[in-house]
Image: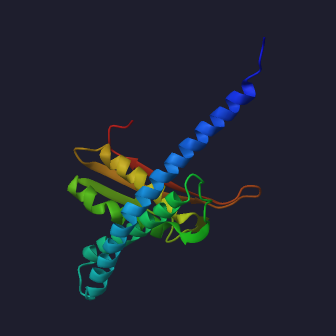
Amino acid sequence: VLEDISEKAMLEQQVVDAEKQAAMGQLAAGILHEVANPLAGIGSNLSLVRSALSDGAPADVTRALDASLDQLDQMRQLLGTLSGFPGRTAPRFEVADLHELVRRSIAFVENDAERRRIRIAVSFAMPSIACEMDVRLIRQVLLNLLKNAMEAMPAGGRLDIRTSYRAGRSREPANVGIEITDSGAGI
């Protein structure tokens, strides 16, 4: 007697996959609940400190607070993404200044780089480059690359960030590049 159980096996696999997704959804919801409230408190305190600073406050303190508030906002957005798990959020394209995004990303890692004796050098192709991008995703990529580069230089070194712009040609659109290099050992 032969019995075709391929359909039954496929259905069982779908049930297992659905259970895995449900478990991941529950984990994401737990993380969201446990992390959202402390983030709100931290954000409130940082905003209070930022508004209490006088105009004569040191620029590095103001930059550090602004970078922290930006990162806090990014964490809130990430938590929002987790709340929609398992679906991926679609990119949200907007026109933004690429150089300002690079500056803010550098500001976030600047103190860590200084502590690690890493010199950061920046070279922008032009004063500003406005382009359409998902700011949150590009910021996340930049921060990951910057942190990885710094981890590759435990004894200090140099981290270079350079942008490039190439005007569009007859059949090719204009494009922008961000190049990050370090003096670390490499992968």
* Residue at figure coordinates x 36%, y 47% from the top left: 149
Residue 61 in the image: x percent, y percent? 25, 75
Residue 48 in the image: x percent, y percent? 29, 82
Q: Is residue 47 above or below residue 152?
A: below
Q: Nearer the viewer, residue 50 or 37?
A: 37
Q: Is residue 9 above or below residue 184?
A: above
Residue 178 in the image: x percent, y percent? 50, 55
Residue 154 in the image: x percent, y percent? 24, 44
* Residue at figure coordinates x 52%, y 52% from the top left: 25
* Residue at figure coordinates x 47%, y 58% from the top left: 29
Q: Is residue 94 above or below residue 147?
A: below
Would residue 5 appear left or right of 182 to someone viewing this image? Answer: right
In this view, the residue farthest toward the front is 1
Which quadrant does the N terminus fall into?
top right
Q: Nearer the viewer, residue 183 or 84?
A: 84
Q: Nearer the viewer, residue 120 or 72?
A: 72
Which quadrant does the C terminus fall into?
top left
Is residue 179 visible in the rendered structure shown here?
Answer: no
Is residue 158 visible in the rendered structure shown here?
Answer: yes
